[in-house]
Image (spheres, helix red, strand yellow):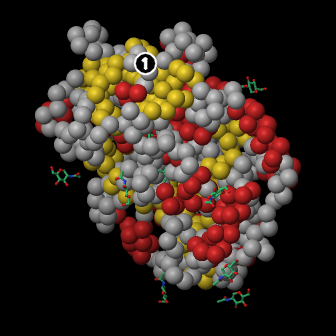
Amino acid sequence: MRSSLVHFPMKGLNLLHFVWCLLSLSFCSADIFTRFNDIPTSTFDFIIIGGGAAGSVVANRLSEDPKVSVLLIEAGPSNEGILNSEVPAFQQLLVGSIYDWNFTSTPQEALNNRILTVSRGLLLGGSTSTNLMVYTRGSSDVYDRWAHITGDKGWSWYQLQPYIRKASIHLFLDFLQLLISLSVIRMSVHSFNGTNFVSLAGFPSPIDSKVIGTTQEQDSEFKFNLDYNSGNQLGIGWVQSTVGFGVRSSSATSYLGPKTTRRKNLHVLLNTRVTRVLPVDDAKPLTVRTVEFTQDAGKTIQRVLAQKEVILSAGAIMSPTILLNSGLGPAEALSSLNIKVVHDLPSVGQNLTNQPNLPNSFLVNSTETLETVSRNSTLEAEFLYRWNETKTGPFVDTPNIFMGWFRLPSNSSIFEQFDDPAAGPNTGHFELIFSNGMLTANPPASGNFLSLRTSVSSPVSRGEITLNTSNPLDYPVINFNLLSSEFDFFAIREAFKAAIRFVSTPSWAGYILAAPANATTDEELDEYIRMTAVTQNHPTGSCSMSPKGASWGVVGPDLKVKGIHGLRVVDASVFPSYPSAHTQAPTYFVAERASELIKKDWGLGL
Ligand SMILES: Cc1cc2nc3c(=O)[nH]c(=O)nc-3n(C[C@H](O)[C@H](O)[C@H](O)COP(=O)(O)OP(=O)(O)OC[C@H]3O[C@@H](n4cnc5c(N)ncnc54)[C@H](O)[C@@H]3O)c2cc1C
Ligand SMILES: *[C@@H]1O[C@H](CO)[C@@H](O)[C@H](O)[C@H]1NC(C)=O
Ligand SMILES: *[C@@H]1O[C@H](CO)[C@@H](O)[C@H](O)[C@H]1NC(C)=O
Ligand SMILES: *[C@@H]1O[C@H](CO)[C@@H](O)[C@H](O)[C@H]1NC(C)=O
Ligand SMILES: *[C@@H]1O[C@H](CO)[C@@H](O)[C@H](O)[C@H]1NC(C)=O
Ligand SMILES: *[C@@H]1O[C@H](CO)[C@@H](O)[C@H](O)[C@H]1NC(C)=O
Ligand SMILES: *[C@@H]1O[C@H](CO)[C@@H](O)[C@H](O)[C@H]1NC(C)=O
Ligand SMILES: *[C@@H]1O[C@H](CO)[C@@H](O)[C@H](O)[C@H]1NC(C)=O
Ligand SMILES: *[C@@H]1O[C@H](CO)[C@@H](O)[C@H](O)[C@H]1NC(C)=O
Ligand SMILES: *[C@@H]1O[C@H](CO)[C@@H](O)[C@H](O)[C@H]1NC(C)=O
């Protein structure tokens, strides 16, 4: 195993790391509290709910102005010192752990009524502290469609470029990786002075040559794409990940910075669950600026007022939940639960969209896969030792190696029934993701695998977040209606067939021993899909943006909640259509632009 996992030299690491430490001195870091009463001030201009991808960005950017006082409230604990979150290879150990909200879905009708687990990060950094670290922007079409839907050109690919560049910093671990990067990614589209690290894998995998081989053998169907983040996502490319110096780069490690430097005007309150947002008494027009929270699971309820604005960044599951509990949502549904309606907003929780995913595992004729490491605690300890001592070795990488997006043929029968749901010609209908081993912390006792996950990139199915009780501490009812649209079912079926074609090329001869399903007919394949599909953990759209004055939607293009003063939503719930990407990068972009919109509104330094 080890002989094939030859690592890249890391000579440049120490110098680069030193330079990074110097740079980071200008970074934001905050005073961190676990008890509200310990915070030395009780006057806050802005209160941000949720310290995930979006909330951390907004907290950083608003507190750049030293005159502004910011409170960031996070339900989970600190991210510091959590090994499983730091080691990229240990991501699967976080799913279903104490750092996971562990939501579940309702029985999904199209999936034989299976209940799905719904993972969300419960710690500083939110889901960016637990996610798979894939960095994908989607296509230029996606953002141009956002601009079109919202009537705000500011959301277009071109106008978002400054925010995209502020959000990420492309990193070269050493000279060799620089050379590889020069040939692998399009330098012109990446940023070298942004905030969150993005890098290529630090370690080669034994299946690299097979994947690349197929793109050469079957160029007409599976073309190679040097850089799927250039605006055109179509084709197979090397995975880019939010990893820096062999360590996960989350919104907490990047935007909330090392503890050594402190912004006295940014206060981070951990282990604190927000229950509701409340109107300011008698304020006309209707103004919502009070945040209600508990630090002891509901025994005591406290309140804090924002002088300027409250920014809701609790994510696509919890942001609509907090609004609904606050009486901001569909009036009839709230009344039936005896929740006092503060403002009728029929779209809150609606249009929830998520990607379905088939975790296909192919049995392979090899022992050089992740299973061999999982099953050998001596080997695992060796790799961990190496990671811990030098941040080198196989554990610097996430399980993902390559990924790619593809379109259904334009003469596919499904287009007789459906308009093309993709945002444009550079945008995929389905996605393939490769790992050299099963994507699980607990592989079966024997067998080695290729994971070739297939998913729908431009899903049509819509679900909803609703409430079951009037207790804000109860979990919401989450229904994705996954694969309920015939289009999505068609796309995931075709994606699976494409995966089979992919591994049937000469490159894989003698390697693949068995496909994950004995599906020779569409009926058998459909049953496999119903029995194995899960979510890709990318919910969006539940507090959607819509044009100013539209009768639907939750926030305007400026992210202010419709009909209300003092309250914005900034997170993945506001996406007005699916980004055809894994959702962390688009969330960072939205949060960077949102921060600037807020600063401009209040005349703060940009
Ligand atoms: C297991 C997993 C794997 C993923 N893999 C990838 C990937 O590889 N690539 C990718 O691009 N995306 C991935 N994602 C998705 C990506 O991480 C999210 O889209 C992104 O983090 C969304 O950002 P957000 O700010 O909307 O929400 P989050 O990052 O989830 O942040 C929300 C924050 O709000 C806090 N919060 C919620 N409710 C309350 C409350 N009532 N009071 C106080 N705080 C609250 C939460 O604890 C959390 O910290 C993955 C997600 C998961 C869960
Ligand atoms: C999620 O499940 C794990 C495993 O059962 C548990 O340890 C953890 O406390 C759960 N998280 C929450 C928020 O309940
Ligand atoms: C990053 O570099 C670009 C190009 O040199 C420059 O325009 C931009 O202002 C820089 N951004 C930051 C945050 O320094
Ligand atoms: C869902 O989104 C569509 C636009 O994609 C919109 O027309 C519709 O009104 C939305 N539904 C709700 C309930 O908001
Ligand atoms: C596995 O590969 C070896 C060569 O590496 C070959 O000899 C053997 O026949 C293969 N096994 C199967 C079941 O194909
Ligand atoms: C486990 O890994 C160790 C260290 O590389 C190796 O010496 C040993 O042979 C492996 N054990 C098995 C059962 O493969
Ligand atoms: C990593 O190294 C440090 C310092 O030597 C040690 O304290 C710590 O226990 C090590 N952690 C792991 C997981 O090996
Ligand atoms: C679509 O066109 C291709 C190439 O012209 C052809 O091979 C294929 O059979 C067509 N498919 C359908 C469903 O018509
Ligand atoms: C709704 O609440 C009832 C009890 O009030 C509970 O039995 C039921 O499981 C809940 N349903 C969901 C989907 O949470
Ligand atoms: C597929 O069918 C073959 C032959 O009937 C059987 O040996 C094999 O176990 C089946 N595989 C799966 C994954 O069901």
Task: State whether residue 229 is above or below residue 84.
Answer: above
Q: Residue at x 17, y 32 (%)?
A: 339
Give percent across and percent down for residue 584. 55, 42
- Image quarter for ligand 2 equals bottom left
Is residue 579 visible in the rendered image? The answer is: no
Left-right relation of 414 to 543: right
Left-right relation of 277 to 8: left
Task: State whether residue 19 is above or below residue 6.
Answer: above
Quarter of the view holding residue 533: bottom left
Name which residue type carries label 1.
Answer: Thr
Q: Is mark 1 within 8 Å of ligand 1?
A: no
Position of the C terminus, as image quadrant, is top right
Give percent across and percent down for residue 364. 62, 79
Quarter of the view holding residue 343: top left
Q: Nearer the viewer, residue 291 or 490?
A: 291
Q: Secondary structure at mark 1?
A: loop
Give percent across and percent down for residue 321. 31, 38
Residue underneath mark 1: 41
Q: Residue at x 73, y 37 (%)?
A: 21
Q: Nearer the viewer, residue 73 or 166?
A: 73
Left-right relation of 61 to 296: right
Give percent across and percent down for residue 22. 76, 33
Density class for disc 1 (Cα within 10 Å; few <14, some 14-19, many ≥20) is few
Position of the N terminus, as image quadrant, is bottom right
Is residue 385 visible in the rendered image? The answer is: yes
Q: Residue at x 60, y 40 (%)?
A: 253
